[in-house]
Each structure stands twice: as structure tokens, then as C-alpha cells.
Image: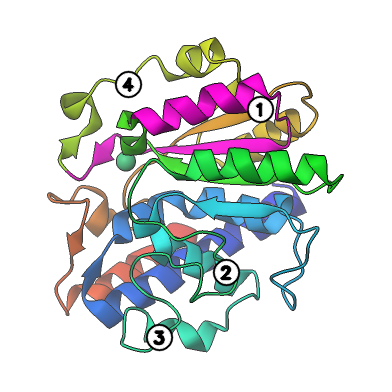
């Protein structure tokens, strides 16, 4: 394993540990998604994004938009790993007066670019931001993280059309395909496949990858970084609860309740995964 991959594996482990610690502070939450997405976030923050931890508003920073506001726990874990938020602050997650509310709020949290909550807005915001950046000659890129459930939203596809129309090659969408959404398995709620062909037909450069395979993610991001002339999308198949067997096959995995005695089991299992 290369040093680059090894360092990112360790980073992904820390992101998962942070997510478990925050989950325990509330006893419940979108923990399965955070565990599933940790490898993607490790690669994005550890290898891809240009930012200055000491200056979250640096004008030339790459923008990372959390369209899925309920994934805030995952992003806080990544922001702590990136040095933008103090690790010690994570224990305030979800508490009154905390800068880390359960749904992502741009006005509360350094490094949180947009407020989430209502789904289907992130890609439209990304399109507008990318147009503005290009117009000002700012080389920053805009990344927008969507969920597969968010692909049910018409506004997502309207934005996909606009983004391609304006040939915004400074946009990279990342879709977390965990095959699950609030109302159940994505395949039962609204069929969205074939995803790669769908994005390509909207004028996007699309790559589909195992979102829990760090070497594969690195290769895909490298390939997309060289692409010009249209926006690009990385479709990431992830597994809910990844790295913690106790939580990988849980019923009601969308908003997970974990018993108080189970948190230490979960942490122990995570350590075993990375042993
Ligand atoms: Mg989903």
C-alpha cells in the first residue's frame, strides 16, 4: 500500500471514530451514513480540496457543499480531521448553543458553505457559485455532495442541465449511493438507475466507483481533475455503517438509534477493522 493510501486509510478511521463519538453524545443520528461516507471524505479533505484550515473563508478555497444537511455529523468529523474544527468541540454536537447543530447550518459552523435541510438545493447553489467563480477568474472548484435519495428531486436535474449548459468544468458532484433513503431502500421508493448513463445523457462526465475503496477513489478523482469542458460527477457506491459490523446490517438504518452499551462495542469493532 502506498504512503498516500495508507495515510488516507488512517484518516478515514479517525473520521469514523469522530462520528461514533458524536453519535454517542446524542445517542442516535445519521451515523450509518457517516461511517459509509468516511472514505470519500478522507480523500476529499485529505487529498483533493484546496483550503486553509486557519482561514475557512479564504477566497480561493475550493467549496465543498453539503447538500444533504442531515449528513452534518459526517462533515463535522471531516472538518475536525482537516483542522478546521477542534476535535474537542465535537462533544458539543447537537447541544443547545453548539456550533455543530444536527443539520448543517452555514452561519453556525466554520467550513460549512451552505445550510442544508430541504433536499435538492445543493447542485443549484453549486451551479451559481461556479458561474460566479468563473466570471471572477477565481480558480476554485465547487464540490457538491448529494445523496441518492436527493436524485428524486426535480431541482437536482434542473441544476444538472444548467451546469452542463454553462460547461462548468469547475464543478464536481459527488453522489453517495448507499441505496437507502428516509422512506426505505432507494430501489423501492423511486428507481434511479442507470445512474452513469443518466448523468452522461445530461452532459456530465461521469465515473462510478466503490466509495469505500480509497485507491479507486483516488484514481477516479485524478481522472476527473484532468477533465475539461463539462461538469463531472463521481458516483460512489457506499455501504451504510461501513467498518462497524454491528451497525452495517441494522434495520432502520437511515436514522440510527444505538443503545448506550453498544457504543463501546462499535468503537472496538472499528479498531478491529483497521487493525
Ligand atoms: Mg441514500
Q: Position of residue 97 (x, y in %)?
A: 37, 89
| Front residue of 234 and 121 | 121
Query: Which quarter of the figure has residue 221?
Result: top right
Q: Which residue is mark 3?
A: 98
Give the structural element (helix, strand or loop) at label 2: helix
Q: Position of residue 133 (x, y in %)?
A: 76, 46
Q: CA distance from mark 3 to mark 4?
A: 37 Å
Density class for disc 1 (Cα within 10 Å; few <14, some 14-19, many ≥20) is: many
In the image, which is nearer the foreground, mark 2 or mark 1? 1
Q: Are marks 1 and 4 in contact (CB under 8 Å)?
A: no
* Sequence-first tag of 1 and 3: 3
Numbered range of the magenta stretch:
154-182
* Sequence-first tag of 2 and 1: 2
Instruction: Identify the residue at horizontal 30%, vertical 30% (top origin).
Output: 152
Q: Which residue is mark 1?
A: 231
Give the structural element (helix, strand or loop) at label 4: loop
Q: Are marks 4 and 2 in contact (CB under 8 Å)?
A: no
| Front residue of 212 and 46 | 46
Density class for disc 3 (Cα within 10 Å; few <14, some 14-19, many ≥20) is: some
Instruction: Identify the residue at horizontal 77%, vertical 21% (top origin).
Output: 229
| Front residue of 129 and 29 | 129
* Sequence-first tag of 4 and 2: 2
* Sequence-first tag of 1 and 4: 4
Q: With respect to residue 39, does 80 lie above or below? A: below
Q: Which residue is mark 4?
A: 192
Density class for disc 2 (Cα within 10 Å; few <14, some 14-19, many ≥20) is: many
Q: CA distance from mark 1 to mark 3?
A: 36 Å
179 relative position to 107: left or right:
left
* Sequence-first tag of 3 and 4: 3
Q: CA distance from mark 1 to mark 4?
A: 20 Å
Q: CA distance from mark 2 to mark 1?
A: 25 Å
Amino acid at each position: 500500500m502506498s504512503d498516500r493510501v495508507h495515510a488516507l486509510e488512517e484518516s478515514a478511521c479517525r473520521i469514523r471514530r469522530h462520528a461514533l463519538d458524536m453519535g454517542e453524545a446524542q445517542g442516535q443520528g445519521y451515523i450509518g451514513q457517516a461511517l459509509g461516507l468516511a472514505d470519500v471524505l478522507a480523500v476529499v479533505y485529505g487529498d483533493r480540496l484546496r483550503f486553509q484550515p486557519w482561514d475557512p473563508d479564504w477566497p480561493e478555497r475550493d467549496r465543498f457543499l453539503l447538500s444533504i444537511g442531515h449528513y452534518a455529523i459526517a462533515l463535522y468529523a471531516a472538518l475536525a480531521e482537516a483542522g478546521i474544527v477542534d476535535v474537542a468541540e465535537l462533544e458539543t454536537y447537537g447541544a443547545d448553543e453548539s456550533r455543530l447543530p444536527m443539520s448543517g447550518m452555514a452561519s453556525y459552523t466554520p467550513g460549512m458553505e451552505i445550510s442544508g435541510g430541504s433536499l435538492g438545493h445543493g447542485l443549484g447553489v453549486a451551479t451559481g457559485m461556479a458561474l460566479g467563480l468563473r466570471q471572477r477568474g477565481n480558480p476554485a472548484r465547487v464540490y457538491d455532495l448529494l445523496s441518492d435519495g436527493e436524485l428524486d428531486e426535480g431541482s437536482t436535474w434542473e441544476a444538472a442541465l444548467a451546469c452542463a449548459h454553462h460547461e462548468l468544468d469547475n464543478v464536481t458532484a459527488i453522489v453517495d449511493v448507499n441505496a437507502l433513503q428516509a422512506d426505505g431502500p432507494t430501489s423501492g421508493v423511486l428507481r434511479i438507475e442507470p445512474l452513469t448513463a443518466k448523468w452522461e445523457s445530461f452532459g456530465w462526465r461521469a465515473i462510478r466507483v466503490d466509495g469505500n475503496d480509497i485507491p479507486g477513489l483516488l484514481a477516479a478523482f485524478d481522472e476527473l481533475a484532468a477533465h475539461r469542458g463539462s461538469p463531472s460527477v463521481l458516483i460512489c457506491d457506499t455501504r451504510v455503517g461501513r467498518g462497524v459490523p454491528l451497525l452495517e446490517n441494522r434495520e432502520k438504518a437511515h436514522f440510527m438509534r444505538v443503545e448506550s452499551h453498544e457504543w463501546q462495542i462499535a468503537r472496538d469493532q472499528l479498531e478491529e477493522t483497521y487493525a
